[in-house]
Amino acid sequence: MKQTKEFRREAVRIALNSGLSRKRVATDLGIGKSTLGHWVSQYRTADLSTPEPQADLARENERLRLENRVLREEREILKKATQFFARQKP
């Protein structure tokens, strides 16, 4: 099945910016890992020296979402550790 150009572009964006492995991204999108790798290499060799402002915003948004998720997980760990040590008696 041939994928649309927009689908390919979005798959590459997710693969490069999501922090997930390419295998995971390919599986989630229902495509082969080698297919995704081929699309990424095509993207990198294409002349994309002037990225669209929307693409920059989307990349920054994705990076911030990932950072936010990590910070929330760290906060939850710290909350649990604080509760654990508060229950400990010297």
Image: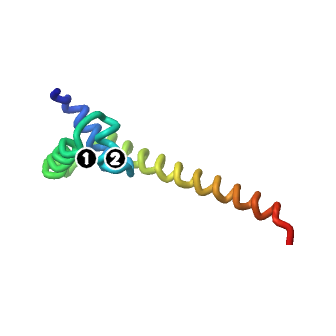
- The disc placed on residue 51 is 1
> Which residue lies most toward the top here?
1
Q: Which residue is mark 2?
A: 56
Res. 32 image quadrant: top left
Q: Quadrant of the C terminus?
A: bottom right
Q: Are marks 1 and 2 in contact (CB under 8 Å)?
A: yes
* Amino acid type shown at disc 1: Pro
* Amino acid type shown at disc 2: Asp
Relative horizontal placement of residue 38, taking residue 51 as reference (left or right): left
Name which residue lies at 34% across and 45% down: 24
42 is higher (above) or lower (below) than 31: below
Name which residue lies at 58% across and 52% down: 73
Q: Earlier in the sequence, mark 1 or mark 2?
A: 1
Q: Quadrant of the N terminus?
A: top left
Q: Secondary structure at mark 1?
A: loop
- Crowding at mark 1 (Cα within 10 Å: few <14, some 14-19, many 20+): few
